[in-house]
Each structure stands twice: as C-alpha cells, then as structure tokens.
Amino acid sequence: MTPPRSEGCVRMPDGEFEAILTHAAEEGAKRALADVGLDGDEAALSIRDLRSLVDCIRLVRRTAMQTAVRMITTGVMPALLAGIAIKLKIFVGGP
C-alpha cells in the first residue's frame, strides 16, 4: 500500500513514526556511547568511576575554596590586630 501524499509530503501513522523515531534514537545513543568507548560490558563500571571522579573533583574544589578563605581570614585578622596595636601605641615604649 502506498502512503497517501499531501502536497509533496508523505504521511504515515503516528505509531509507525514513533517506532521509527524510537529505533533511531536507540541506535544513535548506542553509536554515541561506542564513539566514547562506553559500549562494552564494563560500561556501567566506567560510568560509575567517572561519576566518582567528578564527585572527588567537586570535593577538592570545595575544600580548596574553604582553605583559601581560612588562609585569607587568618592573614587579615593579625594584620588588623597589628594595625590596632600601632594605632593605640601599645608597643611604643616611652618615658
């Protein structure tokens, strides 16, 4: 049976179109995974490892930011105390 034509376009039933679209999406996903090397039996393990690596990178980034903030705070506080001491002339010895 020839599909009906309407103004140069071919029409097909929605169910058949959905089936073709689903098959094309599955094949595209398989090809994309194969292109990046995630198509074997170890693919799930590799993906878990990649997720773990990303989580570790996030943890390191967060820890580095916290350390930087602590170091800056630790540097600023003694500088403020030294400034206050100089302003109040606490360490100036005089008669």
Image (spheres, rainbow, N blue to C red):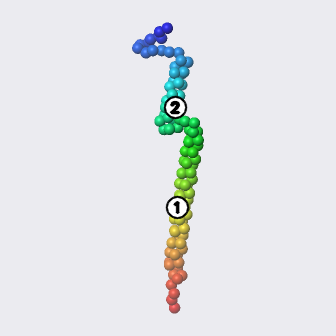
Taking the spot 51% from the left edge, 91% from the top edge, the residue there is 95
Asked if 15 appears above or below 73 in the picture, the reply is: above
Quick one: which residue is furthest to the left in this view? 8
Quadrant of the rendered structure where residue 63 is? bottom right
Residue 78 versus residue 27: which sits nearer the camera? 27
Taking the spot 50% from the left edge, 38% from the top edge, the residue there is 37
Q: Residue 76: percent from the left, percent from the top?
A: 52, 68
Asked if 57 appears above or below 71 in the picture, the reply is: above
Precedes in sequence: disc 2 or disc 1: 2
Q: Residue 88: percent from the left, percent from the top?
A: 52, 79
Asked if 43 appears above or below 11 in the picture, the reply is: below
Disc 2 marks a residue whose amino acid type is Lys
Query: Which disc is residue 68 wearing?
Result: 1
Residue 11 versus residue 80: which sits nearer the camera? 11
Task: Point out the frontmost of discs 2 and 1.
Answer: 2
- Say which element carries label 2: helix
Quick one: which residue is furthest to the top in this view? 1
Q: Is residue 7 left or right of residue 71?
A: left
Q: Residue 82: percent from the left, percent from the top?
A: 52, 75
Taking the spot 50% from the left edge, 75% from the top edge, the residue there is 83
Disc 1 marks a residue whose amino acid type is Ala
Residues at marks 2 and 1, CA–CA distance in whole angstroms:
43 Å
Query: Which disc is residue 30 wearing?
Result: 2
Asked if 85 appears above or below 68 in the picture, the reply is: below
Quick one: which residue is furthest to the front in this view? 41
Residue 30 versus residue 42: which sits nearer the camera? 42
Q: Is residue 51 visible?
A: no
Residue 50 versus residue 87: which sits nearer the camera? 50
- Say which element carries label 1: helix
Query: Which disc is residue 57 wearing?
Result: none
Q: Residues within 10 Å of mark 2 (few under 14, many from 20)?
A: few
Q: Is residue 7 left or right of residue 80?
A: left
